[in-house]
Amino acid sequence: MGKKGKKEKKGRGAEKTAAKMEKKVSKRSRKEEEDLEALIAHFQTLDAKKTQIVETPCSPPSPRLNASLSAHPEKDELILFGGEYFNGQKVKRFYIMNSISTTSERTPGPRLKSPIHLRGAVLTRDYIYYNDVYAFDLDTFTWSKLSPSGTGPTPRSGCQMSVTPQGSIVIYGGYSKQRIKKDVDKGTQHSDMFLLKSEEGREGRWVWTRINPSGTKPTPRSGFSVAMAPNSQTLLFGGVCDEEEEESLEGDFLNDLYFYDATKNRWFAGQLKGPKSEKRKRRRGTKAEPEGANEQECGEASAQAPREVVREVVTEDGTVVTIKQMLTAPGPSKQPQSDEDDSPEEAGGPLVEPRPRSNAMLAVKHGRLYLFGGMFEAGDRQVTLSDFYCLDLHKMDQWTVLVEADPETQEWLEETDSEDSDAGEGAEGREEDEEDEDSSEEDQEPQHPLATPGEQFADYLPRTEQYWVRLARDDAGSEAKEKRVLKVAHAMAKAFFDDSA
């Protein structure tokens, strides 16, 4: 009896021990799983920090021209890169957007974009023009030089390129200079057009073909901008038509729109319809005029010699419709105007349009044309713009102002050296003028460059840094170290910016 009880106690003890061990093992495994989950979550957090993109709001881009503006292929964003800015004494080139910039002293050169490399090269004084063709393979990341057959465009810069629905490449316009006599060069604004397409049945072989589109062609110009519009059409905006003489250059800046349809090989002008007015809507709902009035108008019209007018109207899908109208010659009696002939000013006020300019940046996204920056000239002053506009290419009603910019606020520095302005006068006259100028400068306080509305110090300093460096160097003397001068210049700029804010 006693032995049997001892055996039962031993059995129950072994069961308890096994249960305790199982419980410990289960608890340990749960803890290891929890530790493993925590470790995985920790690594996921670290990996997310490495790959996450942090967007920091910044001030709008500073005024510039000759930059690149492209639409993001996947996001509702526009990407702006590079450009240049000229304030009368310095040329600033932006290599990385809103980050790194360099300045260099030089006289302003031609209003041209960087050369598009086409075949060959022609050297004219200080200008080298190309017309060679290269292709970049996106799989191997390598360049290859093409040798198209046929007669291609002459060497030039500032031309524009677009792609047709058939995969061909269109080259339009450009600029080049040639020497007409000793020390005299003459610029040429090209308005010819070429098509570069692959030869049928010969992979890797290309051929040049000169094309002559029909329709309403753009007037000769340089510095224009292009973008791909809906329906695979090429859109052209603005530019400048230069009237160049031996010692003078005057430009007529433009803000017109043209479309090129590669399928029809035809140019047509882009006309804005203007906003719809309530006045025109109400008129459409009114009753027709009495028959007697119509008969009287017809009688007056028949008494005058009719005139046939042919107009080309472009619909929203790009179709060109030719309309023929028989109009009467203008007579002494005043003819009533039709509702459809209301001018845009009468319909909804004056149209909002970008200022005429050249070298602007264009991009198209979701059927909307975006326009940024560029430049125009006011006398001897070159004004660089930073305004932003948008145009619905389906409605073609009017431009929308996204960002306004007053060009009058741009800094412009000019040489005020009396020796340059009075070079033709005698020594006594120069000395007197210099004394007068010095005395007037002493009486007047220096005009420091002002900050534009909404401009941050991070943008103000690069724009005006050279001015403050000159001012600091004048105060510190020629023997001061460059590092010290730069530090004082930044402090002066910061103090002035804070006081004027």
Image: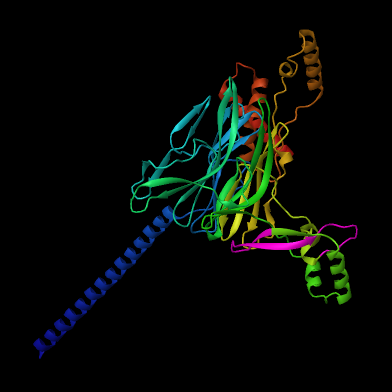
Of all residues shown, which one is farthest toward the bottom?
1
Q: Is residue 279 visible?
A: yes
> Which residue: 45% across, 39% down?
118
Q: Position of residue 442 (x, y in %)?
A: 79, 21
Number of numbered discs visible in the structure rendering = 0
- Report the magenta residues as a range: 311-337
Q: How is the image coloured?
A: rainbow
- In the displayed structure, 290 sits above or below 486; it is below
Which residue is at the front of the view, 492 or 179?
A: 179
Q: Position of residue 282 (x, y in %)?
A: 81, 72
Q: Position of residue 409 (x, y in %)?
A: 72, 39
Question: For this view, does 166 lie left or right of residue 404?
Answer: left
Q: Position of residue 187 (x, y in %)?
A: 59, 32
Q: Is residue 109 visible?
A: no
Q: Quadrant of residue 350?
A: bottom right
Question: For this view, does 304 lie left or right of residue 173?
Answer: right
> Which residue: 42% across, 54% down?
51
> Which residue: 59% across, 64% down?
317
- Quadrant, the N terminus: bottom left
Q: Is residue 332 magenta?
A: yes
Of all residues shown, which one is farthest toward the right?
333
Question: For this view, does 366 lie left or right of residue 451?
Answer: left
- In the displayed structure, 189 sits above or below 431; it is below
- Quadrant, the C terminus: top right
Which residue is at the front of the view, 302 or 184?
A: 302
Question: For this view, does 106 lie left or right of residue 410?
Answer: left
Which residue is at the front of the view, 139 or 328?
A: 328
Q: Is residue 360 magenta?
A: no
Q: Quadrant of residue 455?
A: top right
